[in-house]
Image (cartoon, helix red, strand yellow):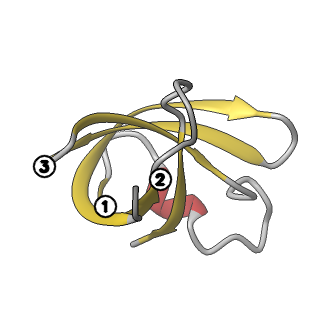
Amino acid sequence: MHPFTDTGLVVRTHDLGEADRIVTLLTERHGLVRAVARAVRRTRSRMGASLEPFAVVEAQIAPGRGNSGLATIRQAA
């Protein structure tokens, strides 16, 4: 499946490793989406502030492979 862009509300975040974060988004067209945002916890990250809980974001999301259902956030603003 190809990457898609959708507007959504950040419902929940979980830290993953040193620099990554798992983000749960409630999107308009795709419903509840869980995705990994890579390197957002680094000090120079541009996406970090956008992906705080209860923020409304426009995100470009690449669906995950297989049955894991964990997508990847490529861009968020």
Question: What residue is disc 3 on?
Answer: 29
Label 1 element class: strand
Query: Is residue 16 shown left or right of residue 26?
Result: right
Image coordinates of residue 30 in percent, x first then y, are 20, 43
Q: Are marks 2 and 1 in contact (CB under 8 Å)?
A: yes
Q: Quadrant of the N terminus?
A: bottom left
Q: Earlier in the sequence, mark 2 or mark 1?
A: 2
Mark seen at residue 51? 2
Relative depth, front residue between 38 and 15? 38
Query: Is residue 19 shown left or right of residue 63?
Result: right
Q: Nearer the viewer, mark 3 or mark 1?
A: 3
Question: What residue is disc 1 on?
Answer: 57
Relative depth, front residue between 36 and 51? 36
Report the Cα–Cα distance between label 3 and label 1: 14 Å
Q: Is residue 64 visible?
A: yes
Looking at numbered disc 1 in the image, what kind of residue is underneath it? Val
